[in-house]
Image (spheres, helix red, strand yellow):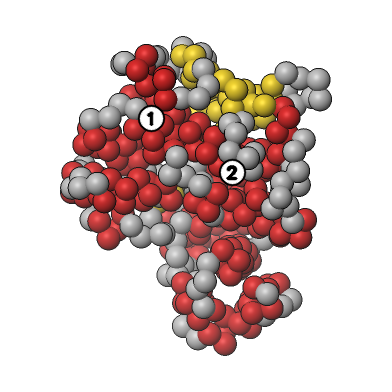
Amino acid sequence: MGKKYLNAKDSVIPTHFQRVLFRELVNKGISSALLLEGLALQEEQFLDDELRLTFDQHRQFIKNALSATGDPHLGWRFGQHINITTLGLLGYAIMASENGAAAVRTLTRFFKLRAPSYDLKLLNVAQNAESAILQINETFDFGEVRYFMLSCIVSAFDHVFMSFNQESSVIERVEFGCVEPIEWYQESATVKYPVVFGGQTAKLFLDVSFLTKPLATADPDTEKTTTQICQEMLSRVEDQNGIIREVNELLLNISGNYPSLTDAANYLCISPRTLRRELKKSNTTYQQMLDNTRSTIAKELLLNTTKTTSEIGYELGFKDTSNFNRAFKKWTGVSPGQFRK
């Protein structure tokens, strides 16, 4: 039987936001060793773009940050350091959206690429609705760090959408699925909208006028390209089940030194023959899945970084740039340089 998908011990949580918080606190004089206590990671490992944390490591890091700062409301302040570029390819897809509604829908659709511990749902978007509701559901029980996580997400969303709304808040009020924190009456004065605690789920009530507002950064071609790539990436980890899903998750969390079919089968606790048979049932092969993963990552890096084709090829396991160029043209029909232009 294959290993269970996405539990608290699996290394599946990307560290985009955690690295931003880590650097912010270290720059303020907080010891990196204190922030990483109990994670079994060195600083250089934690700052590696390819690192994926387990849920337990992620939660421990947040607990360390809260303890080191002595600030129970740290999430609100940290969220203001999250901007559109911090969201990576998802950020570009949001920027290219036609209007506020399309931007919120894109965020809702692909937020798992940045934060797989959450599932967003957009409710009440009819034209006569008083507010659009963005519901935030947890994949895991965050327990004692729930308030930090929710306040960070709300603050970050507010910061991102204000940049498209002439610096006016898009959020009208918030409901949190956690108890009211200590000394909230003092912190509430710094928050621009009312916050109610004790709900079953977290909800953001958005200004519906923002949904119809055109975005100055709208670009249909960029939106089409970026959302397509986001969907390809999301399909690897969410749209498929069983062995297919687990193989895709495995490949997305490994860079360069990709496992052979036999090694992948060993990781999934099945025989190579069983893996071949299960993939055949879905009309695919391990090599096809590996090529799809490499193609998706290559396109993201070409669009979203300044890395050279040689560097990208090396990250994908190609020792020779010409081999990478030939493979990329086979995958997409164009060369890496043409795709980037």
Q: Is residue 294 depicted above or below 214 in this figure? A: below
306 with respect to 78 (left or right): right
Residue at x 50% of width, y 25% of height: 192
Name the foreground residue: 331 vs 34: 34
Residue placed farthest to the right in the image? 127
Q: Quadrant of the C terminus?
A: bottom right
State yes or no: discs 1 and 2 in contact (Cβ < 8 Å): no
Amino acid at dot 1: Phe
Name the foreground residue: 38 vs 21: 21
SS class of the residue under badge 1? helix
The mark closer to the camera, 1 or 2, is: 2
**Residue 163: mark:** 2
Amino acid at dot 2: Ser
Hey, which quadrant is residue 232 in on the image?
bottom right
91 with respect to 98 (left or right): left
Q: Is residue 53 depicted above or below 172 in this figure? A: below
Q: Position of residue 237 (x, y in %)?
A: 57, 48
